[in-house]
Amino acid sequence: MLGVARDNESRNVLDAFFLGKAVAEALNERIESTIGEFLSVVGRLQAEQQKQVQDFQGCLGALDGTFIKVNVALSDRPRYRTRKNEIATNVRGVCTPDMQFIYVLPGKVLQLMVEY
């Protein structure tokens, strides 16, 4: 009887081992698949970023504008009210490729034409 119990224990240990091995293999396959998908997405994003950088080769700078909230006298508020009903002023700036501002134009800018 003691021999039968040991055989059952041994069988249970072996079953648990092979079950654990099967789970580990399935988990490993899933992890490898997920990492492969992740690396594929990263590679695609890097290629897109590379193309965007190439699009700006030889660029002298960048021009952009933003609204900055301001505090002004009550009588001046209508002049500074934006379409979203905030009190702000428009600021345009030009920066070099190394992110140094070389020109800042505060105030309302209705239209800016750049010719080259």
Image (cartoon, rainbow, N blue to C red):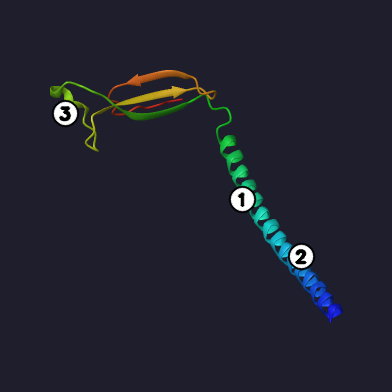
Q: Where does label 3 land, which residue? A: 78
Residue beneath the point at 42% across and 26% down: 115
Of all residues shown, which one is farthest toward the right? 3
Q: Residues within 10 Å of mark 3 (few under 14, many from 20)?
A: few
Q: Where does label 2 land, which residue? A: 21
Which tag is nearer the camera, tag 3 or tag 2? 2
Q: Position of residue 100 (x, y in %)?
A: 49, 20
Left or right: 114 as drawn, with respect to 20: left
Q: Nearer the viewer, residue 60 or 64?
A: 64
Left or right: 114 as drawn, with respect to 9: left
Q: Position of residue 51 (x, y in %)?
A: 59, 40
Residue beneath the point at 70% across and 56% down: 32
Q: CA distance from mark 1 to mark 2?
A: 30 Å
Q: Nearer the viewer, residue 2 or 69?
A: 2
The image quarter in which residue 14 lies:
bottom right
Q: Where does label 1 land, which residue? A: 41
Which comes sooner in the sequence, label 3 or label 1? 1
Q: In which quadrant is the N terminus drawn? A: bottom right
Which tag is nearer the camera, tag 3 or tag 1? 1
Q: Are marks 3 and 1 in contact (CB under 8 Å)?
A: no
Which comes sooner in the sequence, label 3 or label 2? 2
